[in-house]
Image (tube, rainbow, N blue to C red):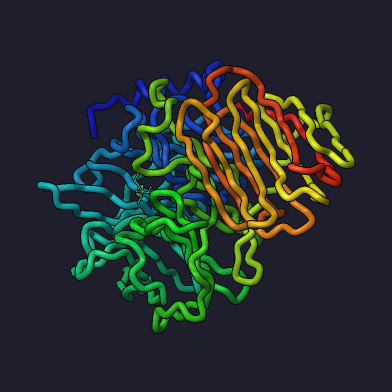
Amino acid sequence: MENFDKQTIDARLAQGFPLEHRWHNRFHLEMPFGLINDPNGLTYHQGAYHIFYQWNPLGCEHKNKCWAHVKTRDFIHYTLPELSLWPDDVHDKDGCYSGCGVSEDGKLRVLYTCNRKEDGVRIPAQRFGTLASDGSVRKEEIIIPDHPENITGHFRDPFLFTRHGRRYLIIGAQREADEKGTALIYEEVDGSWHNLGEIHTRLGDFGYMWECPNLLQFGSYDVLIFCPQGLSARAYDRQNIYQAGYIAGHLSLDSLDMVQHTKFQELDRGFDFYAPQVFEHEGRHLMIGWMGMPDKDGEYPSKEKGWMYSLTMPRELRLRQGHIYSRPAREMRDLRVKESAVELNNSLVSSFRQPLFAGSEILLEMELGEAKIATCVLHYGLEKLVFSYDREQQTMTIDREGMKKGGRGKRIFKLFADQKLSLQLFVDKAAVEAFFQHGEEAASLLVFPEKNIQPELEVRGDSPIKNVVGTVWELDSYK
Ligand code: FRU
């Protein structure tokens, strides 16, 4: 960790968020300065949701990893972010890496990976801590001091889960023998943690490292979410450098076999989504992802302004026939400034344009009729971001080529809409989240418009779209 002065950081944080810059988001969690990445320690505790996340307060590089912390009761109003956990002893001197949280005995405890390198050799330790009333995490016991023998130093991101009253961990890892990605399961027995071994899947050779595993239960199904690194792109899948996805099946904690599992499916189809974390509260599985991607920092211009990346809005996950549907948490509806709602109801639309707000939600239900291609464009003056559905190919294309700054390119994925295409867009200043076919697919991406202008929405078909019913809401800002 570089030299740093907590007081200076606290003083900068106390100034709140500068909203003036055109790329500062209004309803996506971000930091006024520094680089953020993975959401960490998501926990419902004593009436509030606690959200921690990786943060470098000293610059826009991937180093000096600390945990930032905010609290919310409704995902609309947040406390000001604070610096909660930072590298300050021998174990975590090279970073307080990702981990999870749990509410127990009236305390919020976090479990994180202490990143430490000695002569280039990684010595990862997994350690508990407790959130204190001043907002900082008190560092406590190390439960796993180093990686196991058959695993390399890439051993991190513990996630705690419970089955039949017993506690387990799943931890992302790289096998030493073939340098392939895997995940290990630990069980707590009388207060100490035992390595049960690797989870067994039928994925075979599946990348060189698995980061940020989550193990969830949906009814009788187990879902393993993880972020494999080193998979190559396919025609309609895996188009980002690293993936965030899942398999659903049945896990035996005796054999560690994940049986009858689905193929690996991605959780998000956009350019900027990685390292999601899920937590359960009152029967909901809520997920927050990082709107960013490792090893892509050079692409994004907010770096020059001193901050980078944001988190997604919370999404509620549902498992249906082996597929995860994700939709914005219902609380997001309270962001709507009702008076500004615009109702669209057009029959036989060949094209229409609609001005948007500084923050907007757009809900479109299109009956395609004769149209073979339905296109939805966000115009930022002469720049544009395009969503285009090709009914014959059954593909959705997200095209960022029309933006001058920031990452460009396209993402194309399969989407099965026959007569009706449903699209929900959340358009923030520099972050867009899209939900297709009521959450069957989702896409997160960053945009950096050159001008500080409110975008305009255009909907058009190659032939007239039979009917478009839609609503546009102005969304409030949490800042
Ligand atoms: C994923 C990740 C984690 C690690 C953290 C460090 O983005 O690389 O594996 O714990 O980020 O910031």
Query: Extreme bottom residue here?
Result: 255
The total of numbered circles placed on residues is 0
The answer to which quarter of the image holds residue 88 is: top left
Query: Extreme left residue here?
Result: 119
Above-or-below relation of 262 to 106: below
The quarter of the rendered structure image containing the N terminus is: top left
Q: Is residue 129 left or right of residue 270?
A: left
Q: Nearer the viewer, residue 103 or 425?
A: 425
Residue 84 visible in the shown view = yes
Above-or-below relation of 18 to 378: above
Q: Position of residue 428 (x, y in %)?
A: 61, 31
The quarter of the rendered structure image containing the C terminus is: top right
Q: Nearer the viewer, residue 139 or 370?
A: 370
Above-or-below relation of 445 to 157: above
Name the residue located 75 percent from the left edge and 38 percent from the top edge. 460
Name the residue located 83 percent from the left edge and 51 percent from the top edge. 369
Residue 105 visible in the shown view = no
Q: Is residue 53 left or right of residue 362?
A: left
Name the residue located 63 percent from the left edge and 44 percent from the top edge. 434
Q: Is residue 104 left or right of residue 415?
A: left
Q: Position of residue 217 (x, y in %)?
A: 56, 69
Name the residue located 52 percent from the left edge and 22 percent from the top edge. 17
Q: Position of residue 19 (x, y in %)?
A: 56, 19
